[in-house]
Image: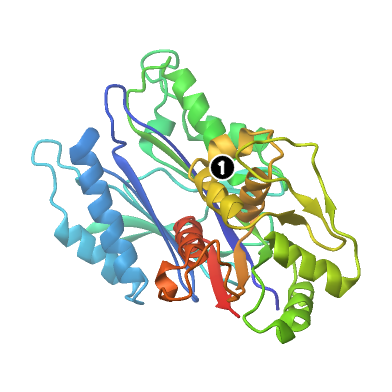
Amino acid sequence: MQYLHAEVGLAQLSKVGEELCGDNVDIVRTAEATIIVMSDGLGSGVKANILATLTTKIATGMLKRGIPLEDVINTIAETLPVCRQRKIAYSTLHIIMITPDGQTTIAEFDCPATFLVRNNKTIQFPTQEKIIGNKIVRVGELCLQENDLLVAVTDGVIHAGIGGLLKLGWGWREVAKTLDTECNEHSETEIIGQHLIDCCEGYYLGCPGDDSTALVVKMRYPQQLTLLTGPPANAEHDADLVWRLFSEPGKKVVSGGTTAQIVSRIIGCQLKVDLTCHDPQIPPIAYLDGVDLVTEGVLTLNAAIERLHDIKKLRDSRKQDGATLLAKLLNTADKIKIFAGLAVNPAHHNPGFPMQMNIKAQVLNKLKSVLEDKGKEVIIEWI
């Protein structure tokens, strides 16, 4: 059975005059489930952000340790105080838990109902009210299918334009109608989320009256990318490493001139360098049959890391240099396997230095950290 992957996209808008968004989202992936917790802190700015962050961190920390949902909600209800004047909780709680087979549990406390988009039709995710910790919580379960979308938003989205351009605000039903027109099986989560936030900013006439967050989850089969960089320590293992690369599913990338020459020799295919894209900072790419991208090594990997820090800019970029192309491939992959050769490159490593001072090792570990922060599974195998 091939398991499904929960692709997550997020877009946010801060209240006018505030540096920090008062909403917070925390995402944790374990072998058992993808856990997403969103919270809207009371008010706006730093105080709201702290309250929302405290809520999400407590919830994900407990859930990833396997603590039952009711105990988690009860703990948060007991931990976070209630505003004396407004008699409401200091933060909302929106929990989404998705297992690899698509089984999904959602808990909603004092937040807008979750949107479920299936077959281009938007409905409310089915829930029932429960009393947990003296709080009314909506809880529901459903098995999601490929291309199903979940959309969770904070009050700032539902109330966009209230008292101004829209007397009663955007409203849940109108947001659902927008999703009907924007969502299909080819939709990207971050683009959907950003479209909702752009609409919010428009309805607020450029002066958001509340923090707004749009979280979009899409169920699809996982995409793998395998990256081969550097020759193995023992040249006798060259052929084994190349055939391992070609035996892996999904996209394939070769990084490094010497590595590309080895692959070319083993598979009996000519390496063709592309000089059409001139970038003084990034060495040119090349082509090999059966390989999706061939780039230079450390310089290109390091530049790709920089591009991964700004996903919106990366997505909009039309550049065709090796670093941009590599960053785009890495960003669309869910599982990334890196075969890193241990052969010493004198330009990158003094043989008398420890492994931690190897430039390539530093770059690959940094790449791993950046990708894992984006919720991707990354494995580095040194050979």
Indicate the quadrant containing the C terminus: top left, top right, bottom left or bottom right.
bottom right
Q: Residue furthest left?
A: 84
Indicate the quadrant containing the N terminus: top left, top right, bottom left or bottom right.
bottom right
Label 1 sits on residue: 190
Residue 298, quarter of picture: bottom right
Other-residue count near label 1 (Cα within 10 Å), few / some / many at <14 / 14–19 / ≥20: many
Question: Vertical placement of 90 versus 263: above or below?
Answer: above
**Residue 91 horizontal side relative to residue 286, left or right:** left
Which colouring convention does the figure follow?
rainbow
Question: Vertical placement of 231 versus 167: above or below?
Answer: below
The percent coordinates of residue 355 (x first, y second) are 44, 74
The percent coordinates of residue 328 (x first, y second) are 64, 48
Q: Mark 1 is on which residue type?
A: Glu
Helix, strand or loop for disc 1: helix
Q: Is any atom of residue 91 visible in this view?
A: no
The percent coordinates of residue 201 (x first, y second) are 45, 23
**Residue 222 horizontal side relative to residue 159, left or right:** right
Closer-to-camera residue (218/269): 269
- Looking at the image, which residue is at 34% across and 64% down? 60
Count of numbered circles on the image: 1
The percent coordinates of residue 226 (x first, y second) are 68, 67
Closer-to-camera residue (217/125): 217
Q: Is any atom of residue 82 visible in this view?
A: yes
- Looking at the image, which residue is at 30% across and 67% down? 61
